Amino acid sequence: MRVVGGPLQGDASVTEASVVVEDQPIGTISPRLYGHLAEHLGRCCYGGLWDGVSAAPPHPIGIALDEWGVWHPEARAWGPGAVDRRSPTTFEQANTLRDALAAGIALEGFHRQCRVLTMANLAQLVNVLQTVVVTDGPACVKTPTYHALALHRPHMGAEALQVEVKAEPAGPFGRPGLSATASARNGSVAVTIINRDFRRPTTATVLASGAVSSGRLLTADSPNAVNDPAGGDRVSLRRLAVERSEPGRVDVTLPPHSMATIEFTQHGAGIN
């Protein structure tokens, strides 16, 4: 499976990227990687997963990652920089499209480590930090991070596939501007691609041995776009325009700062 992408015509600088997804499973992506906190699991956390000292454990012990996510400077009392921090600290912060893409990037790493990483917990669930829903009285709004997790639904419980990415850098840290993760289940393949470039759209030609069953896109006019009770859903999922230009080939366009999931009906899908 390959992805080759570059900016749309009209952009003076043209970049290319490739993502190779091999039919070599890494391991099963536990649905528990998409959990929320784990502070009150009784003996599991406070008594230990294994009471032995010298003897081998009776079963494999996985790694649990508790409380991950983006913390905005204004929502915490610590950290570098001259930032206008709220007092008292309530940990409330805006949840932006940029935060949703950060969640997608973190989940890519979780998939790569799914043989040993068996649980991860996003902080938190409602109203504070990287929340998935925001409430105001009777109003309840889904955040961009909620929609990022929804895009990952096909990966939950599936077999993660190895992915090799080659792309020109984007941003100040020199990381590839395009990233991806893929999984397989019951002969079907799901591929989630992130365009990390804030300014330039990317075109990708998808070569697939199977038929495309769905394509969904998460994006907005600005990476700082938020959903809130006052403004409604500025960031939400939409249909990803996929057009089969010839047998086994699908063309897609990823806008700047966007994430998309494409599902194929047969195992062995390819992106080129």
Image (cartoon, rainbow, N blue to C red):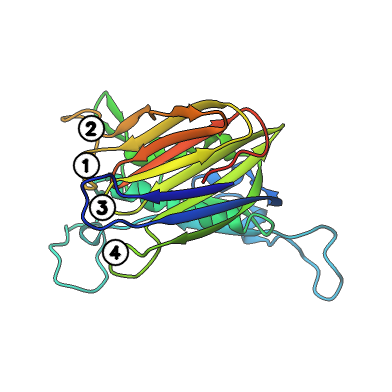
Specify which label sits upstream in the sequence, 3 or 2. Answer: 3
Q: Which mark is residue 234?
A: 2
Measured in 3D between alpha carbons, the distance from the residue under mark 2 to the one under mark 1, in whole angstroms, is: 7 Å
| C-alpha gap between disc 3 and disc 2 | 17 Å
Residue 10 visible in rendering: yes
The residue beneath circle 4 is: 171
Q: Is the Cβ of the residue at disc 1 closer than 8 Å to that at disc 4?
A: no
Q: Is residue 175 above or below residue 253?
A: below
How far is the residue under mark 1 from the one under mark 4?
Answer: 19 Å
Q: Residue at x 62, y 60 (%)?
A: 46
- How many other residues sit within 10 Å of disc 1, few (<14), some (14-19) or many (≥20)? some
Q: Nearer the viewer, mark 3 or mark 2?
A: 3
- Residue ID at (40%, 36%): 252
The picture places residue 217, in percent across and down from the top left corner, at 38, 34
Badge number at residue 198: 3
Q: Do tag 4 and tag 3 residues touch (Cβ < 8 Å)?
A: yes
Which tag, 2 or 1, sits closer to the chain's start? Answer: 1
Q: Mark 4 belongs to which amino acid?
A: Gly
Residue 95, image quadrant: top left
